[in-house]
Structures are given as structure tokens and as C-alpha cells.
Amino acid sequence: MAQQTPRTQIIKRVTLPSGKQVDVVSFVGHMSAQAIVPARTAPLSTCPSCGHDRVQPTSWSEVGSAHWHVHLRCPDCEDRREAIFGQDELDEFDVALDEGTRAVAADLDLLSRANMADDIDRFCKALGAGHIVPEDF
């Protein structure tokens, strides 16, 4: 008789368009905690190929109650990878993504203010030189 490997059952609740909820049961071979959540030396936001800290999730799906299958992409070197991560690790990644979003928004604000100051300066010079008249409005 062939020896069977233990299998892990993953249940995912799906809501159908009708509003009815069904449980989808998947069976996978035996997975240890190390296989589900690979050991990391760097945060998820850091690309293992180029080392930049702008890695972004492109898609994700729930795997069980405490793990997620996540596709990641580095916009700098276009490195793509996917793996299953634990909720704690993804919570840390979420904090890093929020910090990155705030940094980009702050840079955008500075750039917008600099552009507006430049526009105002050019407008004032044109107005002072008589290049703008009431008929322009």
C-alpha cells in the first residue's frame, strides 16, 4: 500500500454575486511553517535583485486564515516574485507601503509648490513687462 503524505486543508469563503456565501476547500501537500513563510533577511519592501526599497504588491489572495499569496514587483529593475507570507510580515509591509505613500505625496506637494511659485514669478514678470492685458482674459 502506498504511503500517503499528510495534506493541509485550506478553506476560503467566497461571496457569490447572488449574495450567497460558499466555502471553497483546497488540499495541499504537507506544509511546514517554514515552507509557508520563507525566512527573510530583508523587509518585503526591499528588492532582493537591486536592493531598492520600492517593491509593490501587484495582486494577492488569501491562503487559509493567516497567510496570503502575494505577487510582488520592483518598479526599478522589474524583478517579479511571488510567495506565501504570514499576516505579521504583511502588516510590516503595509506600514512600509504607507510610509512610501506619504513620502511620495510629500515630494509631489513640494514639486507642485515649486511649479506654482515658478508660474507666479513668470506671470508677475509678464504682467510687469506689459505682455498681459485685460483682453487676454
Image (cartoon, rainbow, N blue to C red):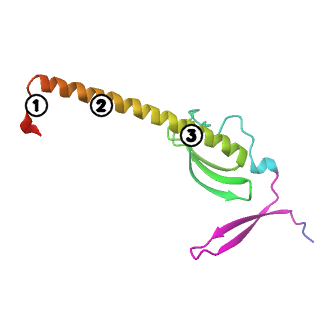
Q: Residues within 10 Å of mark 3 (few under 14, many from 20)?
A: few
Residue at 41% from the left image edge and 33% from the top image edge: 109
How far from the left and from the top, in percent, is residue 10? 75, 63
How far from the left and from the top, in percent, is residue 7? 82, 63
**In the rendered view of the protein, which quadrant contains the N terminus?**
bottom right
Q: Nearer the viewer, residue 2 or 101?
A: 101
Q: Quickly name the residue at label 3.
A: 98
Which mark lies nearer to you, 1 or 3? 1
Sequence-earlier tag: 1 or 2: 2
Q: Nearer the viewer, residue 40 or 11?
A: 11
How far from the left and from the top, in percent, is residue 137? 12, 40
Numbered disc 3: secondary structure: helix
Q: Quickly name the residue at label 2.
A: 116
> What amino acid is at disc 3?
Asp
Q: Quickly name the residue at label 1.
A: 132
Confirm or deny contact between disc 1 and disc 2 (CB under 8 A). Answer: no
Q: CA distance from mark 1 to mark 2?
A: 18 Å
Using residue 4 as the reference point, say whether residue 93 is left or right of it: left
Q: Which residues are magenta?
A: 4-32
Sequence-earlier tag: 3 or 2: 3
> What amino acid is at disc 2?
Met
Residue at 23% from the left image edge and 24% from the top image edge: 121
Using residue 50 as the reference point, say whether residue 35 is left or right of it: right
Q: CA distance from mark 1 to mark 3?
A: 44 Å
